[in-house]
Image: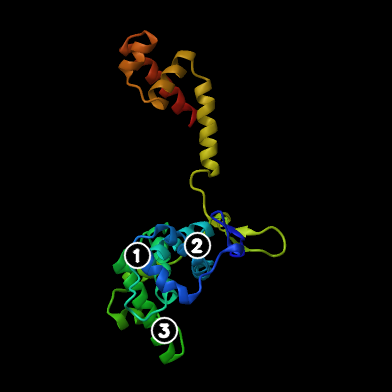
Amino acid sequence: MMNKVVICGVNTSQLPTIKPSEMRGMIQKIQEGDNELRDQFIKGNLRLVLSVIQRFNSKNEPVDDLFQIGCVGLIKAIDNFDLSLDVKFSTYAVPMIIGEIRRYLRDNNSIRVSRSMKDTAYKALQARERLTSGSSQEPTIVEIANEIGVDKEDIIFALESIQEPISLFEPIYNDGGDALYVVDQVKDEKNIDEKWIEKITLEDSINNLSDRERQIVDMRFYKGKTQMEVAEEIGISQAQVSRLEKSALTQLKKGFK
């Protein structure tokens, strides 16, 4: 993905470059309001953005999105660069670009995790490294909890919270034939055999009702209408609707015995 030639409509193989000796003078004019030069300067530094987003190619984010966010960081670097400091523009811009991308990845994570839980998780990971290096064996959750003074349940929740979510169609085993996916290991509570049988039984029972009873069942339990609304719509009394409804439900219940 990172070898893509065109990103966001930009041909990356034909990006212009700017000589380091020209940069400070250009930035000064840009900060004084030269917008045409600003566009030229941005294009001349897009290679910086490309070099940065390659660090994030394991995040499975669309490269176009990362490139656009990186450009936002580049623009912020141009606007905030302090010419009084003896620092190369690239030295200042790269952390700005990285920070913008990391902020985007954090804010667009599919699972939001609180800052305190993240802190607990990172403390637990650091404690595990310390204990492992000291004893040459993997510490238990209880040992980690004692090390950082946090309940073991909180550590378990915190460590699980920072795990990257995986797709249900992620292959977990392949012996050379058909792959076994995560979804194959997930129990489907909605589509078990008993529920299919119940659905078929209900459909058969409904088909055995009279036309008027089927109409009332449909309006009452599928469309959510009141007995008064049903009575008014089909032109009978509410008492008749109630009687037919009870008769229909009695017949449906017999189908499940």
In the rendered view, tell whether residue 242 sits above or below residue 145. above
108 with respect to 16 (left or right): left
| Disc 2 to disc 1, C-alpha distance | 16 Å
The percent coordinates of residue 249 (x first, y second) are 41, 24
Check residue 43 in the rendering and tell me which mark sits there, or answer none: 2
Question: Reading the chain from its start, which is encountered first: label 1 or label 3?
Answer: 1
Residue drawn at x 34%, y 13% is: 231
Q: Residue at x 40, y 58 (%)?
A: 35
Colour logic: rainbow
Is 187 situated left or right of 155 in this image? right
Left or right of 112, for residue 71: right
Q: Which badge, 2 or 1, is on the more N-terminal residue?
A: 1
Q: Quadrant of residue 84?
A: bottom left
| Nearest the eye: 162 or 181 | 162
**For residue 173, what is the image quadrant?**
bottom right
Report the residue marked by disc 1: 31
Kindly tell me whether residue 179 is visible in this rendering: yes
